[in-house]
Amino acid sequence: QKEVEQDPGPLSVPEGAIVSLNCTYSNSAFQYFMWYRQYSRKGPELLMYTYSSGNKEDGRFTAQVDKSSKYISLFIRDSQPSDSATYLCAMKGQGAQKLVFGQGTRLTINP
Amino acid sequence: NAGVMQNPRHLVRRRGQEARLRCSPMKGHSHVYWYRQLPEEGLKFMVYLQKENIIDESGMPKERFSAEFPKEGPSILRIQQVVRGDSAAYFCASSPGQLGTEAFFGQGTRLTVV
């Protein structure tokens, strides 16, 4: 079993839709939870991070962490074609120096 | 302030040759991390280095792979006697201190072994 599971998609939605991306994990030591966006042939770009449980909002993006269920989500409101990319969840434990990534979900927003 | 710079962006090597991948961290960053991304997979940690020290190489294959981060110059990921299975995108990230959440990734080097 992988430490972090993420549905690879692909996921295709119309412009303006609300997008929900999810990851599950098995390691209860994980404390930091990140979402990265990766455009084709580019490096990952940090979108949001959350420490421990709870919600965090940044513009059209909302990150949620439910540690009791070992489940994290990223919501994108009013999705735009420019949001089309692969979204990677990543996490790490307190004091850990390496990130554990999910497989990534390929998202396409159709105009 | 330039971001994390990796070169070359694309590298083609024949089986048995050596591959050298370079990473210049962001200015002021002294911590470097290397990750490998196989097609349709997420990033896998390889090694964590500080200047002149390898801190964690738990993700590095035991043979043929090595990494360094000298006092002067870029970090180098070296793969000796490459095989087709080494074909992947290799990403470097840097942070100003021990990893919190501020790790910035480079654009990657795409290695193709023919």
Image (spheres, coloured by chain):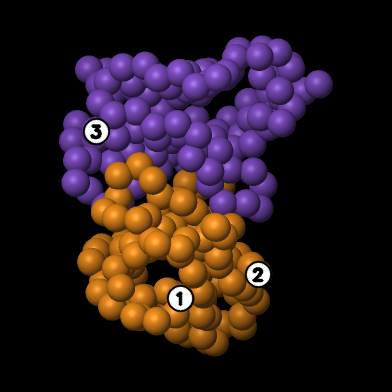
Chain colours: A purple, B orange
| Residue annotated with mark 2 | B10
Work out whether residue B24 or residue B40 is closer to the camera in this orientation and state it.
B24
Q: Residue at x 22, y 40 (%)?
A: A93
Do the numbered discs 3 and 2 sit on residues whose CB atoms are within 8 Å?
Answer: no
Do the numbered discs 3 and 1 sit on residues whose CB atoms are within 8 Å?
Answer: no
Work out whether residue B63 or residue A41 is closer to the camera in this orientation and state it.
A41
Q: Which mark is residue A31?
A: 3
How far apart are the alpha carbons under marks 3 and 2? 35 Å
Q: Residue at x 57, y 51 (%)?
A: A43
Q: Secondary structure at mark 3?
A: strand
Residue B5 position within the rendered picture, expressed as x and y whole percent measured from the top left: 55, 65
How far apart are the alpha carbons under marks 3 and 1? 31 Å
The kind of residue tagged 2 is His
Chain of the residue under label 1: B
The kind of residue tagged 3 is Gln
Tell me the mark number nearer the camera, choosing from 3 and 2: 3
Q: Residue at x 19, y 31 (%)?
A: A28
Q: Which mark is residue B74?
A: 1
Tell me the mark number nearer the camera, choosing from 1 and 2: 1
Quadrant in which the N terminus of chain B appears: bottom right
Residue B21 position within the rendered picture, expressed as x and y whole percent measured from the top left: 51, 75
Res A101 quadrant in image: top left
